[in-house]
């Protein structure tokens, strides 16, 4: 028996053997390549090599140019990426294979994993350069190379993590992390090398290290990039903050529950604890304040005398207001000053006395005082109106916040025996309150944008039939819960000049109110009518309790729910205010007619307009009879499947193909559903969007070509990717025709005719 040594070498060689075509797509992937990079041959075949293993900034065309300058053969070392995202350092020998005409046909690679060897080289170089300096620092220092392997750990780091001298060298940095963080950390450290900069790692996060004996402890870490002859590395300074964390936990609950900003300092004036209100008030991150002198929060003109005042308080500590009768100011991180009110309280702890400062921003109070002093009578009414708005908003915000914070405290209190059923119930309350709070915030933001003129409208002809159908579908579940029947007009053909998104928001709000404040088993009637051919009136009528005349007058006031606060129906009292503003921005009007006991009718009037020209263009483009196509032997017409997630594009093609009686159309709104539909219906032609939410059009094309049942089906790509390289890549992958968006209907028609002609030829 003859031994095929060439094949044996390819299959048994421990390193990776990879062959790519001139476009950089993989055509051969050895078992050794799977061991080095983690991809199987099936996963790698046909895909771009640089898409599989390339790092940011690495480019196939640049590589080809370098290879050609090297005479078609090039040996080098380079950083690549495994399937799991971790970097791998490889020694590469590459060679160009030319065809008979002397053109580049293939490129062959032999790749060897030298990650561990690289770490040892890096360790030797770094050891000589940095060891003496790093041994003199008080913090634990770890230096890792670009593959994530440790090349140097100072003695402080070895003691902190409990390792003998030299044992950490060459190990992945993840050995110092708890098991639950190791998987995600690989991606984090890989991304750091794409944009290396000095920074605190995991700001605002709870970070932990793990010793060799598996004992975890909280840490604070800072990262600094280092450029060496062996390449980029990162130095981590690691500090055990167990003692600080214990102190923080002791006061955290008290601090965070306080409504004011709280800053706690020691006798040296160093900040040891702050709450989130203090972070927000002064504009600092917590990490930037801890350990700093309290004077960083005081304007410079006062800061020089403050240490003496501070020392005097520690000499005789007692609760008191600071600077009574004086003008006190705080200093934000951005350099702005603001007036404050401060109270001081001594805190006795183990071994020392601390001082807690409760700080309140009184800028608003000062502003109001100054304004009232200048124009007391004129601004009094405006101030009262604003106070009412703020009070109502505060009430509306605090109501759901009270539920969230209250039940969260119950869940967080280990001393309370909370059963699983209660826990589930409490979480439900929190979720419900959070949803209501989000709705309130969104509506406040909407109102704020409208009042400030920040809302931009896209005025266009809007078809009411389609908009009302969509609204009916969205509101049907809410109506069904209470047995409310909704009646919508039949096809009206009416169009109005409006912003489609905002008009839909208006209609949904009116429908939601009509359902919410209706009686059980009631009716909601929607109607549309043209007024003198110039305006369209849209009305929403309910069979609820109706409104009194004084209630109608107060209907469009913010946070005024007209006595419905205790009705059991959730609401914000802002929706109708936003609705009125939006209708007016669209040059329309909103009116209401109501009678107690019979219900209410809300009217909106908008300018009437003709149908958009795009719809007329579809009719015109497909008015000509299509090329006749014979039905199949069983008498059925050719089947098309269109996979598209954009509703507007889907609707356009559906309407266009209505004018082709020679085909039938099925549609799917995502890639996986499209593949399922294709395999069950076996269409004659496939229309395929290349940018789908779940899988790409190229992935679908690959799967279709690998399935003998669909390998020969013509696929027409419809995509917004109009770059020539995207088009060439699709055609190289076997796409029959490529049509760019916006869709040119004549081009779509021609492509369909050609595809159907090909299908007839194959069937003959």
Image (cartoon, grey):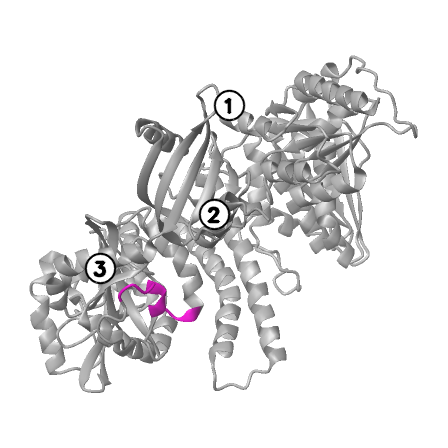
Position of residue 590 measured from the top left corner of the image (x, y, whole percent): 63, 38
The quadrant where residue 561 appears: bottom right
- Do tag 2 and tag 3 residues touch (Cβ < 8 Å)? no
Report if residue 659 is visible in the image.
no
Report if residue 438 is visible in the image.
yes
Whether 170 is among the magenta residues is: yes
Q: Which residue lies under the disc numbered 2?
A: 9
Position of residue 249 measured from the top left corner of the image (x, y, whole percent): 34, 77
In this view, 398 is above or below 94: below
Left or right side of 636 for 685: left
Left or right side of 392 for 752: right
Q: Which mark is drawn over residue 123?
A: 3
Q: Nearer the viewer, residue 301 or 385?
A: 301
Q: Residue furthest front?
A: 1
Could you tell which of marks 3 and 1 lies nearer the N-terminus? 3
Q: Residue furthest top?
A: 624
Camera-near label (2 vs 3) is 2
Q: Which mark is drawn over residue 571?
A: none
The quadrant where residue 627 appears: top right
- Do tag 1 and tag 2 residues touch (Cβ < 8 Å)? no
Q: Nearer the viewer, residue 375 or 362?
A: 362
Whether 70 is among the magenta residues is: no
Q: Which residue lies under the disc numbered 1?
A: 724
Position of residue 444 measured from the top left corner of the image (x, y, whole percent): 50, 50
Left or right side of 580 for 154: left
The part of the chain drawn in magenta is 169-179
The residues bearing labels 2 and 3 have C-alpha atoms spaced at a distance of 34 Å
Identify the element where label 2 is drawn. helix
Camera-near label (3 vs 1) is 3
The residues bearing labels 3 and 1 have C-alpha atoms spaced at a distance of 47 Å
Identify the element where label 1 is drawn. helix
Mark 2 crowdedness (10 Å alpha carbons): few <14, some 14-19, many ≥20: few
């Amino acid at each position: 028996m003859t031994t095929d040594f060439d094949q044996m070498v390819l299959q048994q060689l421990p390193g990776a053997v990879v062959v790519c075509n001139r476009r950089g797509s993989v055509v051969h992937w050895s078992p050794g390549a799977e061991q080095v990079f983690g991809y199987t041959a099936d996963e790698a075949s046909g895909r771009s090599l640089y898409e599989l293993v390339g790092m940011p900034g690495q480019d196939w065309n640049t590589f080809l140019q370098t290879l050609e300058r090297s005479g078609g053969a090039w040996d080098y070392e380079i950083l690549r990426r495994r399937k799991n995202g971790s970097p791998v350092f490889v020694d590469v020998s590459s060679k160009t294979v030319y065809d008979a005409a002397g053109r580049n046909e293939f490129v062959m690679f032999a790749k060897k994993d030298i990650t561990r060897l690289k770490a040892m080289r890096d360790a030797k170089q770094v050891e000589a350069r940095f060891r003496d300096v790093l041994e003199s620092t008080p913090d634990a220092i770890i230096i890792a190379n670009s593959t994530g392997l440790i090349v140097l750990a100072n003695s402080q780091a070895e003691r902190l993590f409990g390792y003998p001298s030299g044992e950490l060298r060459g190990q992945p940095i993840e050995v110092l992390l708890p098991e639950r963080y190791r998987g995600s950390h690989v991606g984090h450290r890989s991304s750091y090398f794409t944009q290396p900069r000095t920074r605190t790692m995991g700001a605002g996060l709870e970070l932990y290290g793990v010793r060799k004996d598996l004992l975890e402890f909280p840490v604070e870490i800072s990262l600094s990039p280092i450029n060496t002859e062996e390449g980029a590395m990162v130095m981590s300074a690691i500090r055990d903050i167990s003692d600080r964390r214990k102190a923080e936990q002791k006061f955290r609950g008290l601090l965070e529950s306080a409504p004011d900003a709280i800053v706690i300092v020691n006798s040296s004036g160093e900040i040891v604890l702050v709450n989130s209100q203090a972070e927000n008030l002064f504009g600092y991150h917590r990490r930037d304040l801890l350990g700093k002198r309290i004077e960083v929060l005081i304007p410079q003109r006062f800061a020089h005398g403050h240490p003496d005042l501070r020392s005097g308080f520690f000499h005789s500590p007692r609760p008191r207001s600071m600077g009574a009768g004086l003008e006190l100011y705080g200093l934000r991180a951005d350099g702005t000053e603001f007036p404050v009110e401060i109270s001081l309280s001594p805190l006795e702890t183990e071994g020392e006395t601390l001082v807690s400062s409760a700080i309140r921003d009184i800028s608003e109070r000062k502003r109001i005082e100054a304004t009232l002093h200048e124009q007391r009578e004129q601004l009094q009414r405006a101030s009262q109106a604003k106070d009412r708005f703020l009070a109502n908003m505060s009430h509306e915000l605090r109501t759901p916040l009270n539920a969230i914070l209250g039940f969260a405290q119950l869940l967080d209190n280990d001393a309370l025996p909370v059963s699983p059923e209660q826990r589930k119930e409490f979480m439900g309350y929190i979720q419900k309150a959070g949803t209501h709070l989000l709705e309130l915030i969104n509506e406040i933001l909407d109102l704020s944008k409208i009042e400030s003129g920040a809302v931009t409208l896209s005025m266009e002809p809007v078809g009411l039939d389609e908009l009302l159908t969509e609204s009916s579908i969205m509101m049907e579940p809410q109506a069904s819960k209470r047995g409310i029947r909704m009646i919508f007009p039949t096809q009206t053909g009416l169009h109005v000049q409006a912003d489609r998104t905002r008009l839909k928001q208006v209609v949904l709000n009116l429908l939601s109110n009509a359902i919410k404040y209706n009686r059980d088993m009631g009716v909601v009637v929607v109607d549309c009518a043209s007024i003198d051919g110039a305006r369209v009136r849209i009305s929403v009528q309910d069979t609820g309790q109706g409104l009194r005349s004084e209630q109608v007058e107060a209907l469009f006031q913010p946070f005024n729910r007209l006595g419905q606060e205790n009705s059991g129906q959730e609401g914000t009292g802002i929706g109708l205010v936003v609705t009125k503003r939006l209708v007016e921005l669209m040059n329309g009007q909103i009116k209401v007619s109501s009678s107690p006991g019979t219900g209410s009718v809300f009217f909106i009037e908008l300018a009437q307009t003709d149908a958009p020209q795009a719809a007329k263009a579809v009719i015109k483009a497909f008015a000509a009879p299509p090329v006749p196509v014979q039905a199949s032997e069983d008498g059925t017409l050719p089947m098309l499947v269109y996979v598209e997630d954009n509703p507007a594009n889907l609707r356009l093609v559906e309407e266009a193909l209505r004018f082709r009686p020679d085909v039938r159309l099925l549609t799917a709104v995502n890639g996986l559903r499209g593949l399922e539909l294709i395999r069950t219906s076996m269409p004659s032609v496939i229309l395929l969007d290349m940018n789908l939410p779940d899988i790409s059009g190229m992935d679908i094309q690959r799967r279709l070509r690998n399935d003998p049942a669909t390998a020969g089906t013509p696929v027409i790509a419809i995509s917004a990717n109009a770059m020539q390289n995207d088009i060439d890549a699709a055609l190289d992958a076997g796409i029959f025709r490529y049509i760019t968006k916006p869709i040119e209907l004549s081009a779509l028609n021609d492509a369909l005719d050609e595809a159907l002609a090909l299908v007839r030829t194959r069937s003959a």
